[in-house]
Image (cartoon, rainbow, N blue to C red):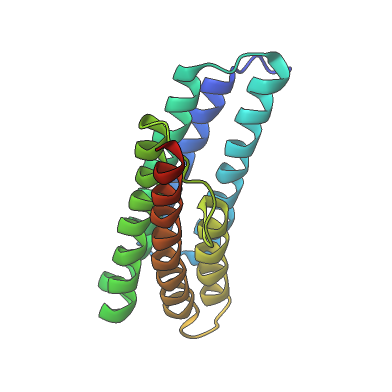
Amino acid sequence: MRAGLTPNAMTLFGTAGAIVCALVFFPNGMLLAGTFTVWGFAMLDLLDGAMARARGYGTPFGATLDATCDRLADGALFAGIAWWCFAVEHNLRAAAACLVCLVLAQVISYIKARAEAEGLKADGGLVERAERLIIALVGTGLEGLGVPFAVEGTLWLLALGSVITTVQRMLAVAASAREAG
């Protein structure tokens, strides 16, 4: 906060860093470097919201920028991992799981955004963004340490959790719509 950075600048910096690291390190098989750098930039995402609240800078634009940047960073993370699975490891099962995770990460976020635009609630679910990041990065980190099939296993686990979360959110929207009458 003392460096003169605004919350929006932190959002943009963290997103750019996460995208670059995910698309440089993971496709080149540098899984540990990718894991730790993407994790570090993801931590900035936690700081920007806290900074905005502490300074009283929270705005609808800032919230929209943050949500948009989250989608971009998530897309880059899963694209980088999918690229590694397909081009480096030649593991089509893991690449497929990663693509499922990429699509469902976007869908889960969209359900909430669309529900809120309609005045409905769609919070919660088994696997929200923080859990997605943790699970994906634990998998890449373990594989980077030499644990075989860690990426594939965690991606299928995440894909299953994401399907469950999608259903949970849609059920929450349906319940909220019934309450709204």
Judge whether 28 appears above or below 85 on screen: above
Q: Observer-nearest residue: 180 or 107?
A: 180
- Residue 95 at x, y percent in the picture: 30, 72
- Residue 41 at x, y percent in the picture: 56, 42
- Residue 172 at x, y percent in the picture: 46, 52
Q: Observer-nearest residue: 152 or 86?
A: 152
Judge whether 101 appears above or below 114 on screen: below
Q: Classify residue 180 by image quadrant.
A: top left
Q: Which residue is drawn at 42% across and 31% down?
A: 119
Q: Which residue is drawn at 54% across and 62% down?
A: 126
Judge whether 122 appears above or below 89 on screen: above
Question: How many numbered markers are drawn?
Answer: 0
Judge whether 103 appears above or below 121 on screen: below
Q: Which residue is drawn at 42% across and 64% down?
A: 162
Q: Classify residue 78 by image quadrant.
A: bottom left
User: Can residue 29 be seen by looking at this rendering?
Assistant: no
- Residue 135 at x, y percent in the picture: 54, 65
